[in-house]
Image (cartoon, grey):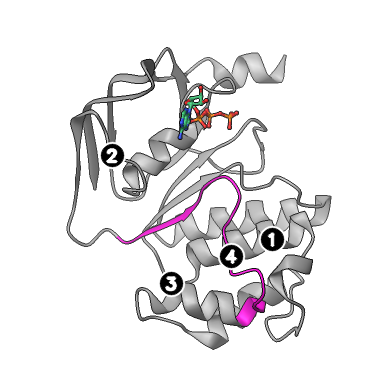
Amino acid sequence: MLEISKLNKSFHKHSVLKDLDLKIEDGDFIYIHGINGSGKSTLFKLICHILEADTGCIVMDEDVHIGALIENPGFLENETLLFNLRFLASLKHHFDETHVARLCTLFQLDLYSPIKMKNYSLGMRQKAGIIQAIMENQNLILLDEPTRGLDFESVKIFCQLVNDLHEQGKTIIIAAHDYLTDIHYQTIYQLKNGQIIQDQDFKNHYSL
Ligand SMILES: Nc1ncnc2c1ncn2[C@@H]1O[C@H](COP(=O)(O)OP(=O)(O)OP(=O)(O)O)[C@@H](O)[C@H]1O
């Protein structure tokens, strides 16, 4: 689905990603951890073409449709949730209102609320960010710190949702500091010193 080879990215001579290689197959369910500033968000931004790599390449299958939540979700602050989600979907010309309303209900959001985005709480914005990343049946879903600001019940709903999406065949990559044991990840990677390495011992360390 996606192959990253020898990817390099620096900011003002600060080298963040160094010859990073990563191969992602259809249906992978990946957790990436790494210390603050290790480059997780940068990697996601490069995959989404929000940033450009210095050198290296990212090759993607033609049918890949990326849904992403990276850092703070950006919205049109003076507009409603419905306006924002319809606007974001309109970029790809696919807005299934019934499906989106169902996702909102799942997360206890009202798609038809007249409240403007600027008045949404942190957790409500985060839920809206998760919804926009999955609402168009995207087949590659990148979620950066997705449970930030979510209440306990919503975290449980989120875990169930991503497990279901994976069972439906979606490829999902989650970068986060909190390892949620309810999520049925297949592979765990660590981003360290600019490179990504499989972290087979992570679960043992984590459970200590
Ligand atoms: N636009 C930018 N300009 C300058 N430096 C940047 C920029 N974006 C990221 N960086 C730097 O790149 C490094 C990696 O940042 P990044 O946000 O990718 O880390 P992260 O692993 O997602 O961190 P965290 O766990 O804190 O979210 C940091 O040192 C950061 O300061």
Question: What label sits on residue 59 in the rendered view?
Answer: none
Q: Is residue 72 magenta?
A: yes
The residue labelled by disc 4 is 75
Q: Amino acid at mark 3?
A: Glu
Q: Main secondary structure of the magenta part?
A: loop
The residue labelled by disc 3 is 136
Residue at image position (58%, 65%) is: 75
Name the image quarter holding the C terminus: top right
N-terminal label among 2 and 1 = 2
> Mark 4: few, some, or many residues within 10 Å (few <14, many ≥20)?
some
In which image quadrant can residue 33 be found?
top right
Q: Amino acid at mark 2?
A: Glu
N-terminal label among 4 and 2 = 2
Which one is closest to the eye, mark 1 or mark 4?
4
The reply to whether the C-beta atoms of the residues labelled 1 and 4 are less than 8 Å apart is: yes
Residue 193 position in % (x across, y down): 42, 12
Q: Nearer the viewer, residue 75 or 195?
A: 75
Classify mark 4: helix, strand or loop.
loop
Residue at image position (60%, 44%) is: 183
Q: Nearer the viewer, residue 40 or 140?
A: 40
Residue 48 position in % (x across, y down): 35, 49
Task: Find the magenta span and give its range.
Answer: 65-82
The residue labelled by disc 2 is 52
